Image: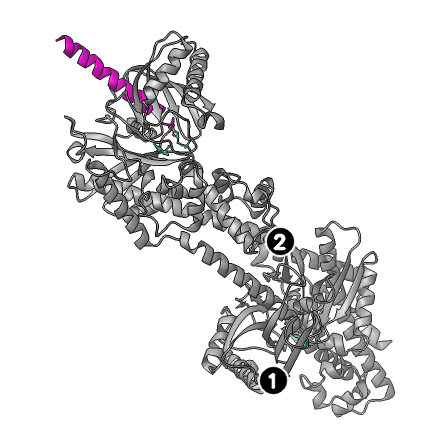
Amino acid sequence: SAVDRFLYAMRLHDDQLEDISARFQAEMKKGLSAESNAAAAVKMLPTHVRSTPDGSERGQFLALDLGGSKFKVLQVKVREGMGIRKGGVEMEEKIYPIPKELLIGRGTELFDHVSESLKDFLQEKNINLEKTHPLAFTFSFPCEQPTLNQGLLLSWSKNFRLRGLQGKDVVQSLKGAIERTGGMNVDVLSMVNDTVATMMTCGFDDQRCEVGLIIGTGTNACYMEALRHVDLVEGDEGQMCVNTEWGGFGDDGALNEYITEFDRDVDAASNNPGKQIFEKMVSGMYLGELVRLVVLKMAKVGLLFDGFVSDALRTKGKITTANVANTRDILTGLGLTPSQDDCIAVQHVSTIVSFRSSNLVAACLSAILTRIKKNRSLRTLTITVGVDGTVYKTHPQYPKRLHKVVRRLLPESHVRFVLSDSGSSKGAALVAAVAQRLASRRKQVDETLFPFQMSQEQLHLVKSRMRADLEAGLKNKNPSTIKMLPSFVYHTPDGTERGKYLALDLGGTNFRALLVNFKKGLHQNTRLYHKIYTVPMEIMQGTGEELFDHLAQCVSDFLDYMGMKNAHLPAGFTFSFPCEQTAIDTGTLLTWTKGFKATDCEGHDVVNMLREAIKRRNEFDLDIAAVVNDTVGTMMSCAYEDPECEVGLIAGTGTNVCYMEDVRNIEKRDADAQRMCINTEWGGLGDDGSLNDIITPYDAEVDQNSLHPGKQRFEKLTSGMYLGEIVRQVLLDLTRGGLLFRGHVTEALKTPGIFETKYLSQIESDRLALLQVRSILQQLGLDSNCDDSIIVKEVCGAVSRRAAQLVGAGIAAVVDKIRENRGLEHLNITVGVDGALYKLHPHFSRVLHDTAKVLAPLCNVSFLPSEEGSGKGAALITAVAKQKDKDAGCKGQT
Ligand code: 0WK
Ligand code: 0WK
Ligand code: BGC
Ligand code: BGC
């Protein structure tokens, strides 16, 4: 017919619809990817709704539904409250008209109207104004949401064009208005787009509903996208609902060949020209205008009403979508006297306009469904689409036509359409219920982790307590928690050290044997060979004889490996446990620490025990000339590189520090040297209860289950042997509280030592996506979901951060003491460091540095990780000891 010819451009055939569907799929990709999102016409906004209703939502909520044709205030009771049939939702609502001028006024005025309406609703429904009411906010405009209850307005659309809110957080604006209205307490828990609320509403009864569609004043759709495709949100686990804002499809010209002159006219006359091109071809706000402009043109060219044009027909907005449905009375309303053919023709025009709208929606909807099918690599997709909007609800043929075209475009899929019968606020309330649960979980996790957060005051306290016990340990009257053990090392290396030495290194986790050869010339060319031997648990906790026999056997293996069985080398023995020394080559073990508990060792000289073990083997001989603590060995190793290194720090399985103390301060031991290196054994700080105000129940539990309860309390807050256990205790507690792993306390979680500290380092590395955190948890037999892994990462972070801060406070105490020892305003000093925690943990060293800098502002502390461990240091000390013997020897002679 004439109309068909006239509106040829509006009749879209399936191949065109498939083309539009393909274009829209491309637009979706553009909107989802981080690098092309900014310029994308279809914004694909993440909503932070990570799941459709799962049946656990409950609660009473107020709801605001703003942005559609009607502004509503509601109260929604989900699965609770008297008389609600099991599992039901009860809603009370009231529509509050919005005065036209408010739609184009100041944003704050609109929100004042909203909050005054809310107050009116509370009063009318006798809802207690004192109680704080959780509120779910549906706001149907494009908003960027950093979180579930924040929404930065990108732009207005439809008939809203207000000033002063673009780019602002509309949740804050609402809270501001509620504040201004006063007399009510409302907690805005979540803000959702009406498509999301519609999807959730329909998802309440139909688990398959994973798409929300609005064809009302405006048009839009949302759907559950795979999180791995949502670049703008961290994590690639599970799903997230994306608000496509497909109204903007075509704003970048992607639909130009489908745009007709009438569309251009509608756009030009709209309050946001160039924007929402797709919406202006589809939604209720514009269909009436399209019909009017087509009818006007046809009248002008004499195809209607014998070419008579009335003013009304020329007037914008005279034909609204509502009455496109029945033609006769609209034409009379326009002061026209239509003939029967005119009516049929006009009816045909509105049918074609409405047809095109449903076809375009079908095309883009099929694009979304195709994408979901691909995401899940399904051959056939069975899914439900939740729909709302006056066009869909009131245009008699619209739903049928839409369903038919979608099924024609996706013949192999089973697409069900569910009309959201009571508006979208039920869905909004379900989102709020999830937000409430997440918020309460968040609060409980924060409360659990709060004691691990060290305030500046607390860190200053730890620094001064450390300082006090360092001082006390140097005095010999009363025992101190920090033993301050003399090392008989009087100065750091001066580069004159020469010769070949064997270094034996019993650390926290393994035993190392090293051959170190100091050659003439620059110290770079120190040759060093080493071999690492494990120390099995049963040896660590067997008899002293077995332990030292094991060490002697390792040495024998190393000498074989080096072919130096008969070298009779001088050896330095790094022994990383508290030893009382009376000379450089003796050391009485005071107490085992870390994972060691070998019998008949404490109170014995560890050098003799090693010598006896070697004698027992009777196949090689060693001249053990020095025994040093690993902190001392580390300080010497690093001092060989940097003469300013006068402190040695171990942050590994255990923790400890040594430093060059002025002999005049070492009351319990005099020596005719200016300084001596003191092995502080600061791990014992707190053994007298001085740290009880920061020790948490989790720490107490770890101490109780440790090999040496009550001992090494500072070490048990800061070192690798224990951090994993502290994390496990916290995870246990959170799981028992139902906040983690769905409350399942598995055997794995109850297994001591399962959470090795190396996992902390892995879990906390920024590069590690949550997925990998989950696989680590999987390996540990902990079946977790995305949120669980987020919490586990947080717990690890809290525990390791505290450890680094406490060690930082300890270092600040040591370097400040050295500065004051030397009466310096300012001290430059280097700390030689070793230990897996310091070297491998992604954040430990930085937090340690920052804390030391803040707590010891007058000291410029640089940290030098030791390259080859403390072995070289032990060899250096052995070289010095041998040198002295020689000097003493020839002095003896002279
Ligand atoms: C009813 C929903 C509301 C949505 C509206 C859209 O409760 O959230 O905005 O449908 O349809 P309209 O009222 O614009 O036709
Ligand atoms: C390597 C040193 C060794 C020290 C160890 C501490 O060579 O003396 O005991 O570091 O680190 P851990 O092995 O306890 O992580
Ligand atoms: C808005 C969308 C909304 C849709 C339906 C559009 O104009 O940009 O956020 O979902 O209308 O109300
Ligand atoms: C020991 C120290 C050692 C530290 C680091 C502590 O348990 O008591 O002697 O330096 O661990 O290995």
The magenta segment: 867-894
What residue is rendered at 59% in x and 62% in y? 47
Q: How many marks?
A: 2
Query: Label 1 is placed on what type of residue?
Result: Tyr
Q: Which residue is mark 2?
A: 227
Q: Can you say whether 94 is above or below 411 in the image?
A: below
Image coordinates of residue 138 in percent, x first then y, are 60, 72
Q: Are marks 2 and 1 in contact (CB under 8 Å)?
A: no
Which badge, 2 or 1, comes first in the chain's sequence? Answer: 1
Which sits in the foreground, 93 or 37? Answer: 93
Q: Quadrant of the C terminus?
A: top left
Query: Label 2 is placed on what type of residue?
Result: Leu
Q: Give the quarter of the image for residue 623.
A: top left
**Secondary structure at numbered mark 1:** loop
Q: Main secondary structure of the magenta part?
A: helix
251 sits left or right of 657 in the view: right
What residue is rendered at 44% in x and 40% in y? 722
Q: Give the quarter of the image for residue 890.
A: top left
Image coordinates of residue 307 in percent, x first then y, are 79, 86
Q: Can you say whether 622 is above or below 542 in the image?
A: above
What residue is rendered at 49% in x and 74% in y? 175
Q: Quadrant of the N terminus?
A: bottom right
The alpha-carbon separation of the residues under discs 2 and 1 comes to 37 Å
**Secondary structure at numbered mark 2:** helix
Whether residue 822 is in magenta: the answer is: no
388 sits left or right of 592 in the view: right
Q: Which residue is mark 1?
A: 96
- Residue 645 visible in this rendered orientation of the protein: no
